[in-house]
């Protein structure tokens, strides 16, 4: 087998990002939509780390750690919102929150 | 050896993410997501980013997944409620959008001329080097992240409390 190049990692992260995007659009369950957003953030992390290895600097690692912190905040806030709207409508399907559709 | 490990872990990651999207039950989705986080941590370790790999397991597989599973258990969803989920009418467009974005990114990636990873310093990716960079060059963004975490805590508490009026 050939040696692993930066393209392998970039293709993998692009694939993960696109899978996360498709998941966010296709699924209607709010919890799974949040999980798909986490997958997208992970794909970005993989790009940062692969490019840090490529350019031989720790900058990408620092950025990956920042992205992790932001992902943690996003998960906390997002799950708080999910709990709040579950209390209002007893459902976590995105279809049940169309009251603002006009 | 490294090549085989890369293919094994990337296959596990992609496969578990696909399974996560296809599962009806949120708990099953969360389990798939944990496996993909672990294999991504292995990929980070393959890229000599040991510190980030450890943080990936601690923060993602530890904290964020526990939060997810806690919320799923807290909501106590009925089985019938999960089963009547229908796929979005935009599913077809979603796949087209995903494939389009993927091919666009491929076009951009293959413009990178020199593709092999070069030599690295022995201290690359250790906590010392990453920490040194984080607390000198990136000190201000680090502080801003701290403020963001504080805002997140306050927001989560405000969102999660019961209305007392």
Image (cartoon, rainbow, N blue to C red):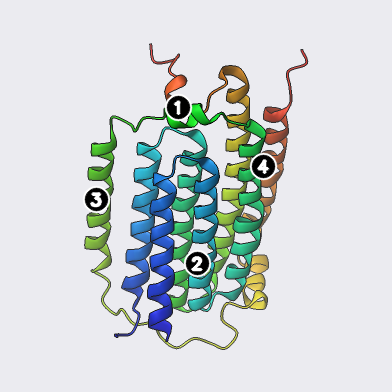
Q: Nearer the viewer, residue B129 or A68?
A: A68
Residue B64 at x, y percent in the picture: 62, 50
Residue lying at the far front of the rendered structure: B80
Earlier sequence position, callout 3 versus callout 4: 4
Q: Residues within 10 Å of mark 1 (few under 14, many from 20)?
A: some
Q: Is residue B32 above or below residue B51?
A: above
Q: Is residue B67 visible?
A: yes
Same chain shared by disc 3 and disc 4: yes
Quadrant of the rendered structure where residue B154 is?
top right
Residue B39 at x, y percent in the picture: 50, 66
Q: Residue at x 47, y 27 (%)?
A: A93
The residue mark sitting in front, 3 or 2, is 2
Chain at tag 3: B
Mark-to-mark CA distance, 3 and 2: 24 Å
Earlier sequence position, callout 2 versus callout 4: 2
- Residue bearing the label numbered 3: B99
Q: Residue at x 46, y 20 (%)?
A: A96
Which numbered tag is attached to residue B130?
none
Q: Is residue B52 above or below residue B79?
A: below
In this picture, residue B13 sits left or right of residue B79: left
- Residue bearing the label numbered 1: A94
Considering the image in quadrants, where does the C terminus of chain B appear? top right
Q: Is residue A99 above or below residue B155?
A: above
Same chain shared by disc 3 and disc 2: yes
């Amino acid at each position: 087998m050939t040696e692993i190049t930066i393209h392998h990692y970039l293709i993998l992260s692009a694939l993960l990002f696109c899978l996360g995007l498709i998941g966010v659009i296709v699924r209607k369950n709010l919890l799974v939509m949040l999980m798909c957003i986490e997958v997208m953030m992970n794909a970005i992390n993989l790009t940062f780390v692969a490019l840090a290895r490529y350019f031989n600097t720790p900058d990408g690692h620092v950025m990956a750690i920042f992205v992790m912190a932001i992902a943690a905040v996003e998960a906390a806030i997002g799950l708080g919102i999910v709990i709040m709207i579950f209390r209002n409508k007893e459902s976590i399907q995105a279809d049940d929150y169309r009251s603002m559709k006009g | 050896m490294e090549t085989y490990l890369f293919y094994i872990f990337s296959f596990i990651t992609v496969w578990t993410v696909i399974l996560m999207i296809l599962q009806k039950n949120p708990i099953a989705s969360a389990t798939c997501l944990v496996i993909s986080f672990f294999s991504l941590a292995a990929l980070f370790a393959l890229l000599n980013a040991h510190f980030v790999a450890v943080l990936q397991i601690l923060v993602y597989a530890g904290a964020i997944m526990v939060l997810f599973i806690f919320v799923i258990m807290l909501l106590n969803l009925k089985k019938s409620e999960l089963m009547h989920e229908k796929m979005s009418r935009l599913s077809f467009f979603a796949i087209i959008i995903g494939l389009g974005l993927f091919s666009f990114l491929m076009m951009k990636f293959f413009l990178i001329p020199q593709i092999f990873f070069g030599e690295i310093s022995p201290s690359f990716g250790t906590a010392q080097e990453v920490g040194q960079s984080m607390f000198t060059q990136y000190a201000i963004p680090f502080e801003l992240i701290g403020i963001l975490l504080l805002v997140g805590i306050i927001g989560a508490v405000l969102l999660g409390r019961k209305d007392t009026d």
